Every structure is written in structure tokens, then in C-alpha cells.
Image (cartoon, helix red, strand yellow):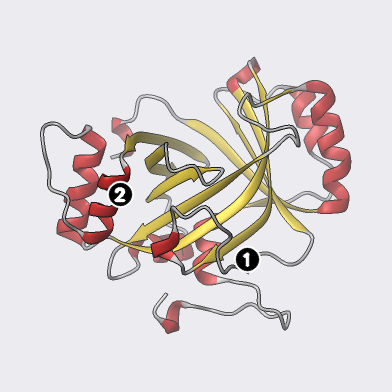
Amino acid sequence: MFEEIDRYRHEHKYIEPEINLIGIETRLGALLKRDSHVHDNGCYSIRSLYFDDLHNTFLNENIDGVDERTKWRIRIYDRNRDHISLERKMRKSDLIAKQSCTVSEAEFEAILNKSLDISPDNPPLLNVFIKEIKLRGLRPVIVVEYERTPFVCAEGNTRVTIDRNIRSSSEIGAFLEDRALACRPVLMSGQNLIEVKYDAYLPDHIAHAIEHGRMRRETFSKYYLARRLPYSAKGRYVSLINHGG
């Protein structure tokens, strides 16, 4: 499956406390442009609905460290239901590739109801997704939401994003609603995620702006964090696997 994708990118992830991000964000702001979709505050919100099969295969592959794996999600930005994106993200080691297509609100509701059929009029990716629903029993399992501060650079086709306030919700039916969902944090207070994506090379000046000696690359995904390790108010990580996910 991965070999069918013509274009892939490197992706590195780091978890950093807010106090470190202040300096990193200042340096990135002096070197890079902001993504054109940001608001006056320099960020936008992302809400994603993740899917898995009846055996939680995608989650278990992440836990087991399977080298080549896939995730399906539906995503909206700033709670705007006018643009709903279906995405398939594929990973092989630290290489990633993504395919996407837009779906209408009616198609989204039909996906939730499992009433959408394969059609030659559908985008090819949507037909693949419908096939996965019918054959593997894909179903929505968790909502993940956060605020993203994005920086971009033409050199290396580099994109650096800072994701804050990462949280998850079980309010799947309210995914398109323009309101705050009942959520739980998936990282300890003050911890945020930096993602660095680039094509063939990461420019040195960007690497130096991001990294410091104590940074450690992480391998997990937001989906894994949301399903496996939600952070409780009592300061403990709680597994959802034994509670139906």
C-alpha cells in the first residue's frame, strides 16, 4: 500500500513544555513564514475523527511498533463544516504519506450511519474507505482536537507545527457541531507537541532553531495518546482499551 504513494515525507515529533516552546516559537517566527490559513493569533484549530476496526488494529499496530501502518480520519478546521476532509495517513518508519479528498456533510452523515455505497461518482479514496468500512468494520472511535501554530519554508518543503491543548472526546455524534466538546487532556499540563515535516532534507537553520540538547524524538501518534493514555485529573494515565475504547 505504501509503495503506491509517489510522494513521502520525513516526520519527527517532540513533546516539549510550554516554557521551552516560547523560545522555539520566537526563533521560528524570525526565520519562517506562518501558514496562510492562520488567524490573527497565529494559529487555527483542528478537530479529527479517527476510525478503527472491531479489533482496534490501527491502535494495536501503533502500540506494537509495527513499521508500516495506516490511519483513517475525517478532519475539519476551526469547526467549519463547509470543508470536511477524509484522510488516509500511511507511515513507514519516520516516512509518512497522506491522501485526502473532500466529503459533503450528507456523505459524512452517511459514513456514520454506514449507509454510503461505493459509486463511480465518488472520489477514489472515498470508495476505498467505504470498502474498508464494509469489509473490516471500520467505525469512528475517538475525536481529537487541538490548536495548531504552523510555520512553513520552501527549503526542503519544510513544515513545523506546534500543537497545544491536545484533547480527546467521545462525543462522536457532535463532531460537526460548532461548540466545545466534553474533552479530556491527553498530555500532562503544560506539555505540547512539535511536529517537523520535510522532504529530502531539513535545512540546518531550521533544525538549530528547533532542537536543544535535551530534546527526544517520540514515535507515538495523537490517536494513540487519545485512545491509550488519556491524562486523568488525578495525575495518572488511564487505559481505555479495557473500557471499550
Determine the image quadrant of residue 88.
top left
Q: CA distance from mark 1 to mark 2?
A: 26 Å
Q: Residue drawn 56% across and 69% down?
A: 182
Question: How far across and down, in percent of the image, does residue 119 sit?
Answer: 11, 38
Q: Which residue is mark 1?
A: 186
The quadrant the N terminus occupies is top left
The quadrant the C terminus occupies is bottom left
Amino acid type assigned to the residue bearing label 1 in the image = Val
Q: Residues within 10 Å of mark 1 (few under 14, many from 20)?
A: many
Q: Nearer the viewer, residue 142 or 154?
A: 142
- From where the camera sits, is residue 56 visible? yes
Residue 116 drawn above or below residue 185: above
Amino acid type assigned to the residue bearing label 2 in the image = Phe
At mark 1, the secondary structure is loop
Residue 60 drawn above or below residue 16: below
Q: Residue drawn 24% across and 40% down?
A: 126
Q: Name the side, left or right, on which 134 lies relative to 30.
A: left
Q: Name the side, left or right, on which 89 lies relative to 168.
A: left
Residue 226 drawn above or below residue 177: below
At mark 2, the secondary structure is helix
- From where the camera sits, is residue 213 visible? no
* Circle nearer the viewer, 1 or 2: 2
Q: Which residue is mark 2?
A: 108
Question: How far across and down, in percent of the image, does residue 193 sit?
Answer: 68, 50
Determine the image quadrant of residue 237.
bottom right
Question: How far across and down, in percent of the image, does residue 240 sit?
Answer: 49, 78
Q: Are marks 1 and 2 in contact (CB under 8 Å)?
A: no
Question: How far across and down, in percent of the image, does residue 10 sit?
Answer: 55, 34
